[in-house]
Image (cartoon, rainbow, N blue to C red):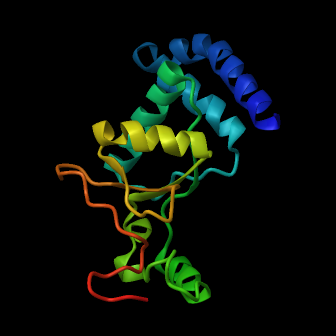
């Protein structure tokens, strides 16, 4: 119930922000108002370090999800430096959720862990138009930007290698 109320407040806020967004950038008012409202809804979100293509694709996707489908799409984790990825990798004993830094799309700035679940479902359904794909069966939240590629085959988990069971 709390999430529904917060989502409704975020939508109302975005509508109210359309006028100042239009004054700032008439051709991009919906994108700006959406971004401003979602930054208030998800204040800890950090999009810094994403590649320009990843950021543009995600911004376009979340704007469409928000205005056309009334779906909120936030990020819990985007770019990570190699040291943070290594720390997470060492802490993940089963190696089924975290890759080492040299293999992680988070380190290269092309991976996003999204929220809420409804937003991730929207991105799974519509993300191919933005070259954003869910990559792993066991991570409903993890998407990667893969422009110019055919949709990648989904893997069971990040540590999965064909012919090797872990």
Q: Is residue 52 above or below residue 20?
A: below
Query: Would residue 41 be found to the left or right of residue 166 on screen?
Result: right
Report x, y in % for residue 137. 44, 63
Q: Is residue 17 above or below residue 10?
A: above
Q: Residue at x 43, y 83 (%)?
A: 100
- Give the quarter of the image for residue 39: top right
Query: Would residue 116 be found to the left or right of residue 112 on screen?
Result: right
Q: Residue at x 24, y 51 (%)?
A: 151
Q: Is residue 61 above or below residue 9?
A: below
Q: Quadrant of the C terminus?
A: bottom left
Report x, y in % for residue 165. 38, 88
Q: Residue at x 62, y 45 (%)?
A: 116
- Give the quarter of the image for residue 108: bottom left
Closest to the observer, 44 or 69: 69
- Give the quarter of the image for residue 77: bottom right
Q: Residue at x 25, y 58 (%)?
A: 152
Q: Quadrant of the N terminus?
A: top right
């Amino acid at each position: 119930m709390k999430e529904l109320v917060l989502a409704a407040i975020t939508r109302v806020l975005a509508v109210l922000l359309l006028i100042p967004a239009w004054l700032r950038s008439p051709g991009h008012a919906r994108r700006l108002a959406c971004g401003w409202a979602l930054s208030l809804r998800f204040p800890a979100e950090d999009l810094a370090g994403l590649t320009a293509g990843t950021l543009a694709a995600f911004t376009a996707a979340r704007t469409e999800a928000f205005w056309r489908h009334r779906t909120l799409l936030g990020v819990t984790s985007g770019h990570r430096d190699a040291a943070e990825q290594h720390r997470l990798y060492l802490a993940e004993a089963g190696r089924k959720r975290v890759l080492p830094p040299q293999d992680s799309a988070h380190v290269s700035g092309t991976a996003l862990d999204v929220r809420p679940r409804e937003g991730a479902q929207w991105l799974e359904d519509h993300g191919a138009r933005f070259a954003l794909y869910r990559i792993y069966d066991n991570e409903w939240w993890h998407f990667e930007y893969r422009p110019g590629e055919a949709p990648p085959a989904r893997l069971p988990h990040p540590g999965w290698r064909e012919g090797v069971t872990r």
